[in-house]
Amino acid sequence: MRERYLDAFDTISIDALNGDKFRTGKVIPKGLPNEGASDPSVFSTPRNREGIQVGTAIALMVRQTHHAPTDTVRFRNLWGSTKLAQLQAEARADSGPSYDLMAPVSSLGLPFLPVGARADYLSWPALTELMPTSFPGVKTSRDDVVVDIDRDRLETRMQRYFDPSVSHEEIRRESPGALESTGRFRAEAAREELVRRGFLPDNVVRYSYRPFDARWLYWEAEANLLDRSRPDYFAQVAPGNLWIEARQKQTGVEFDRGTVTELLADNQGNGLSNFFPLYRHSPTAPNRLFTMDQDGAPHENLSHDAVEYLTGIDSDASQLFFHVVAMLHAGPYRRDNAGMLRQGWPRIPLPNTKEQLSRSAALGRLVADLLRPTVQVRGVTMGTIREELKAIAVIARAGGGTLDPSAGDLTVTARWGYRSKTGAVMAGPGRSVERAYSLAERQAAEQWGNPLGLSTENTFAPLGDATYDVHLNERAYWRNVPASVWHYKMGGYQVIKKWLSYREHDVLGRGLNEVEVREVRDMARRIAALLLLGSRLDANYHAVVTMTHAWTPSDCRIEQSQHLWDGET
């Protein structure tokens, strides 16, 4: 279609009006005036401030009498609350607006918007060319039935669902979603079928619901109780296997994919995620988790060309796996290639020496451990806590004193979340108070920079120059959550704020316990440690791209049959 437009018109001008809830989160991107502020829909009115949720654009395509095809597109972005007024003023002006001129590239699919990437980005292998097997995440469509933060509550609910003495009417009152039919799910017939078979205790499994948010899932392969149960994926989840989350296209402006988990996982936010395992199950041995070679080693999720690359530098699959993690979380990688990361699977630069791959993998292992809330990290969540992290997200009582859980001091009532009419959990405004660091907090943070000889300014750069007190309620708050930690996003969501939205008392139905209060503290410290690792990840990325392996696939095949798509878009 785009090729046809270029052939049929003399000029193509595009005004991107943004305001897209799904792509930009209705937020003005970093580096632009009023960054972080709300970017409204151009269709906002005094009576409907929200406008519409999807982004919009105006394309003006002109064909002249003496026609000549074009190979360029004029493009510009409009942001902020004044863009409609700007368009109206420009319509009355004698001269036209200013555009950036771009030439759509055929190898990139002729995009009609600027596509940012390093010149050598397309010479790197796509993730699918390195790790050919991946699985789409589980899609429940009935989270309120089959997912829970509390295992005992989930088991009780599912045991009642499977109890033949409990009527459909009772289940409908207790868990409306369980008895709500859809095109793929005949609710009452499905329950009757499952009741005949019975409850399976082993199907209550740990579940990566969102980044940094591990819950419990009742996994069920039959009767479409789960909208997409992914049995092939479920069969491969076991201790010793790790997974990288990725998407074929990054929907947001800023790349924030690449979490790591050892758990069965959800789609990690809007859209569909794929999970790439370190090891893969052999289709010829369906009853065994790993195919065993003659020496007893597990079968690695590597393409033929990836095996040749690793053999050539005397390395292995785990080194490559963690190197991929390190690349995906390097700031310059995300910024330099942001446009291309919205167009296809991430492409990964490969170092041309074993030593550099090993250094990169060591950083990737640190990142992977920090991303996994089920793994304790020495110096961050266990043992002697690093000095620069000790003062972060400390639970405190307003006015001083001791918090009393029995008096509701740990109950979240600061309006972080609520249930919509459909039962979905929506984020609320909450209460977070921005302030300057105290002297003690600044001194603690500077402990990170001292061994590196960094200035105070550079010490605070990764954490932000302000901090927040994040409230559970009127009495209790987490003191000193640095700005960059508080605003940190993964999978399209502000991580800590999203976690809190599901723990609001009216949503969760109870107060937090002390373990969960520490979980928020540890989450903040994990994120801070990730941010403080940024300079090393950046330097590692720059080292890799200056000594990149020349990737020359032996053929152009990608084992697409191993990507278990089911026709969803």
Image (tube, helix red, strand yellow):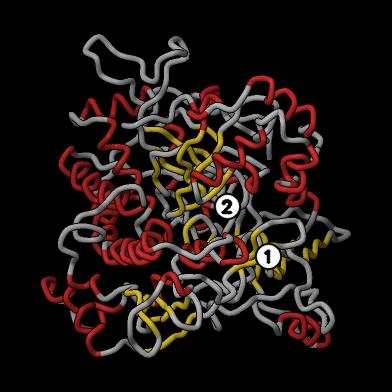
Report whether 182 appears left or right of 507: right
Residue of label 2: 269
Q: Is residue 272 visible?
A: yes
Give the residue displayed 26% in from the left and 83% down from the top. Answer: 441
Dot 2 or dot 1: first in sequence order is 1
372 or 17, which lies in front? 372
Q: Residues within 10 Å of mark 2 (few under 14, many from 20)?
A: some
Give the residue displayed 64% in from the left and 33% down from the top. Answer: 228
> In 3D space, how far apart are the residues under numbered discs 2 and 1 (Cα atoms)?
16 Å
Q: Position of residue 149 (x, y in %)?
A: 51, 51
Amino acid type, label 1: Asp
Quarter occupied by the N terminus: top right
- SS of the residue under disc 2: loop
Give the residue displayed 46% in from the left and 64% down from the top. Answer: 512
Report whether 346 appears left or right of 29: left
Amino acid type, label 2: Gly
Q: Residues within 10 Å of mark 1 (few under 14, many from 20)?
A: some
Q: Please say if 187 is above or below 272.
A: above
- SS of the residue under disc 1: loop
Instruction: Return the mark for residue 399.
Output: none
Q: Position of residue 204 (x, y in %)?
A: 50, 35
411 or 289, which lies in front? 411
Residue of label 1: 20
